[in-house]
Image: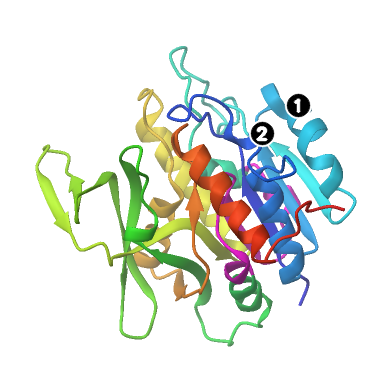
Amino acid sequence: MMKPTLLILAAGMGSRYGGLKQISRFGPSGETIIEYSIYDAIRAGFKKVVVVLRKSFADEFMRTIINRALKKVNISFVFQELENLPEGYVVPPDRVKPWGTGHAILMAEHEIDTPFAVINADDCYGADSYRVIFDFLSMPQTGNHIEEYCLVDYLLKNTLSESGSVARGICQVDHDGYLTDIVEHKNIFESGNAYYSVMPDQSKQELTGDEHVSMNMMGFLPSFIKHLKNYFRDFIRLNIDNPAAEFYLPVALNRVIHEGLARVRVLSTDSRWFGVTYADDRKVVAENLRDLVNKGIYPGNLWE
C-alpha cells in the first residue's frame, strides 16, 4: 500500500484570534504550529503533505514558513476560494466566510490518491497521534464490504481555552470502538470545576469534562472525497443564500456513518493536544512547546 498523505487545513480566517494563526510563530526558533505538525508527520512515516490555503496569503505562507520544511518532505499546495462551487452556482455578494472544512478537503481532490489524514493548521496533536493514525491508514482494509475510516479523539477537559468558549464535536462511540455520532457543541466553556455547553436556546447543558471529542484529526480513504462532493452539492443547494452556513467535516462524517457507507474507528493516543483559538492562547502554546523542547521531544530548532 502507498504511504498515507497528510492534508493540512490552513485556509481559515482566524476571526477570534485576530489574525492569521497559520503564519504566527510559537516555537523557540520561530517555528509555526504547522511546522511542528509536519515534523511529527515525517517522524511517523508520512512522505507527502498537502496544504489547503487561500491565495490572499499563499506567497507569505510559502516564503516564511515552508521553505525549510520543503527540504524534508514533498509538499503540495491547493487553494480554497469562495468561487469553487458546483456548476450552476455563483458566490452571493454578501458571502465572506470560507465554505468550511468539508469544502477545504474537496480542493485537494487531485492531490489525493492514497489514504490520507486530515488535521487543522492551528492544533498541536502530539507526536504519538501521528504514529497512531499513520499505522491505521497503512494497514490494508480487512476485505469487509464496508470501508473503514478513523478519528483520533481527546478528552474535552484537555482541549479547552482559558480565554473563552470553544466549539467541539462530542463523540458517541459503541462498545466495539466505532464512532456512531458526532454532536456539535458551538459554545463550550469551563467555570470553576464545572463544564458547560450553551445550547441553541441559550440554556446550559452541564458536561463532565471526560467526554471524548474530535479535534478534526481524521483518516480517510480516497473514496471519501466522492461522498463529500455529493454532500457539498446538497449543502450548496440548501444554503447558498445563507452567509453564515459552513460545510463542516464532522457533519459529512456523520452522514457517511448513518448511510452505512463506512465505519469510523476511534483511536486513542498518549499525546496531549493544545492549540490556539484566541490571541491570549499564544503564550500557553509557546510555553507548551518550550517545555517539550526542554524534555527532548523536539529539538530547539526543528530543521537544523
The amino acid sitting under disc 2 is Ile
Q: How many marks?
A: 2
Nearest to the observer: residue 125 or residue 59: 125
Viewer-proximal residue, 110 or 159?
Answer: 159
User: For residue 243, what is the image quadrant?
Assistant: top left
Inspect the magenta stretch and tell me whether residue 129 lies in it. yes
* Residue found at x 37% / y 22%: 241
Q: Amino acid at mark 1?
A: Glu
- Image disc number at residue 23: 2
Nearer the observer, 68 or 77 = 68
Tell me the distance, in whole angstroms, between the alpha carbons under discs 2 and 1: 8 Å
Q: Nearer the viewer, residue 118 or 33?
A: 33
Circle 1 sits in a helix, a strand or a loop, which is it? helix
| Residue at horizontal 42 percent and vertical 62 percent from the top | 256
Looking at the image, is 191 positioned above or below residue 164? below
Q: Are dots 2 and 1 in contact, CB under 8 Å?
A: yes
Question: From which residue to which does the magenta span run?
Answer: 107-130
Who's the residue at 41% across and 27% down the image? Answer: 240
Q: Could you say where residue 182 lies in the image, as x and y percent from the top left? A: 33, 60
Instruction: Say what secondary structure mark 2 lies in.
Output: helix
User: Is 295 placed left or right of 155 in the picture?
Assistant: right
Residue 92 part of the magenta segment: no
- Residue 161 x, y percent position in the rendering: 37, 45
Mark 1 lies on residue: 60
Q: Is residue 156 left or right of residue 50?
A: left
For residue 52, what is the image quadrant? top right
Residue 133 versus residue 11 in the image, above or below: below
Numbered mark located on residue 151 in the image:
none
Earlier sequence position, callout 2 versus callout 1: 2
- Which image quarter is the N terminus in? bottom right
Residue 242 % position (x, y):
35, 25
